[in-house]
Image: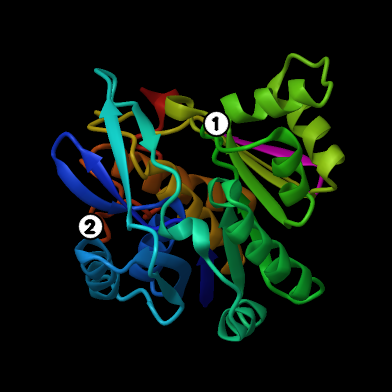
């Protein structure tokens, strides 16, 4: 399985210290631990933080062959605050190195031959990186690559129109319930229920697949005009940083391996829940028996 992602690599400056992060990278770190061949398309600064970020990405066995070095912007550092419920808020400095990702032939070739290509909305805040991503999507349109759009609404770094444009280029979009309702309302939805708004946004974007995470209440997956629900796993939350990224990694992994929607959702929710019990976005949890098909931790059984 070959997976490529595009977007931000950064340091999450948590109360406990700096942790390697960035949603596109977090997804790959988990997928690499599950056995996929993973590569990140991004940019880091020509500084000590950039040297260390490259070293740590390589240490996690994610390819850095497409990680560019930006000479005139620093490596990204994000200040993360965690509230008493473990929910994170972010202060994302602009500009930084990943705002200057340029187009490379090697990146185009890698995406075209990948089983899945994961991209987000945050990295499109700057026209340089945005144009690079749009060109990659245009030039790889019609290939077998499964294009996954990870919606990540961080004010003031997005517009609703730009998010919708990217959604229309994807095969599947993943977002949380707050993001779903914000986008649905912005584009004129009068619906109240979550399933109605999923169908509304999917029709608007021309998507056959959409996944919505529901925090402690699990997630839903919409595919082939059917809605699949998972009520989540009850865990003691340390912080939520990276839990959605591991959820998405688990979902992609299972879908590409031919799992049913319900099985894929169960696995993804388990991964996301386990990450939420740890500090930081990519804790090493692969040895834990979380994908053995048991319902012992299901929230609806507790």
**Disc 1 to disc 2, C-alpha distance:** 32 Å
Residue at point 58%, 24% (across, down): 178
Residue 284 numbered tag? 2
Quick check: 260 above or below 270?
Answer: below
What crowding class fits label 2: few (fewer than 14 Cα within 10 Å), some (14-19), or many (20 or more)? Answer: few
Return the residue nearer the eye: 47 or 227. 47
Q: Magenta residues?
A: 224-230
Main SS of the magenta part reads strand
Quick check: 10 above or below 110?
Answer: above
- Describe the element under mark 2 as helix, strand or loop: loop
Pair 1/2: label in front = 1
| For residue 175, side relative to residue 63 (left or right) | right
Return the residue nearer the eye: 205 or 224. 205
Instruction: Decide if residue 156 is in sight here.
Output: yes
Q: Position of residue 208 (x, y in %)?
A: 79, 50
Q: Position of residue 67 (x, y in %)?
A: 42, 73
Quadrant of the drawing holding the C terminus: top left
Task: Looking at the image, tell me whether mark 1 or mark 2 is earlier in sequence order.
Answer: 1
Residue at point 68%, 61% (across, down): 131
Residue most toward the front? 72
Residue 167 numbered tag? none
- Describe the element under mark 1 as helix, strand or loop: loop
């Amino acid at each position: 399985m070959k997976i490529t992602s595009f977007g931000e690599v950064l340091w999450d400056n948590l109360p406990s210290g700096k942790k390697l992060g960035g949603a596109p990278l977090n997804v790959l770190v988990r997928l690499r631990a599950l056995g996929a061949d993973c590569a990140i398309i991004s940019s880091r600064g020509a500084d000590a933080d950039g040297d260390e970020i490259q070293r740590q990405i390589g240490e996690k066995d994610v390819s850095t062959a497409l990680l560019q070095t930006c000479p005139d912007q620093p490596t990204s550092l994000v200040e993360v605050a965690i509230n008493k419920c473990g929910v994170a808020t972010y202060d994302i400095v602009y500009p930084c190195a990943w705002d200057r990702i340029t187009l490379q032939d090697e990146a185009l070739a890698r995406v075209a031959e990948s089983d899945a290509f994961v991209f987000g909305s945050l990295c499109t805040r700057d026209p340089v990186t945005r144009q690079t991503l749009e060109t990659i999507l245009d030039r790889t349109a019609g290939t077998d690559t499964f294009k996954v759009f990870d919606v990540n609404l961080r004010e003031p770094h997005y517009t609703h129109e730009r998010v919708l444009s990217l959604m229309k280029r994807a095969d599947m979009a993943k977002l949380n319930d707050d993001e779903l309702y914000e986008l649905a309302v912005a584009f004129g939805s009068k619906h109240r229920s979550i399933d109605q708004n999923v169908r509304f946004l999917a029709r608007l974007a021309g998507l056959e697949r959409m996944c919505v995470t529901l925090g402690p209440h699990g997630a839903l997956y919409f595919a082939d005009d059917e809605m699949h629900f998972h009520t989540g796993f009850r865990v003691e939350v340390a912080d939520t940083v990276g839990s959605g990224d591991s959820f998405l990694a688990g979902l992609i992994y299972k879908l590409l391996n031919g799992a049913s929607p319900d099985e894929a959702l169960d696995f993804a929710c388990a991964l996301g829940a386990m990450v939420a019990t740890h500090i930081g976005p990519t804790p090493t949890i692969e040895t834990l028996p979380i994908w053995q098909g048991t319902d012992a931790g299901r929230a609806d059984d507790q």
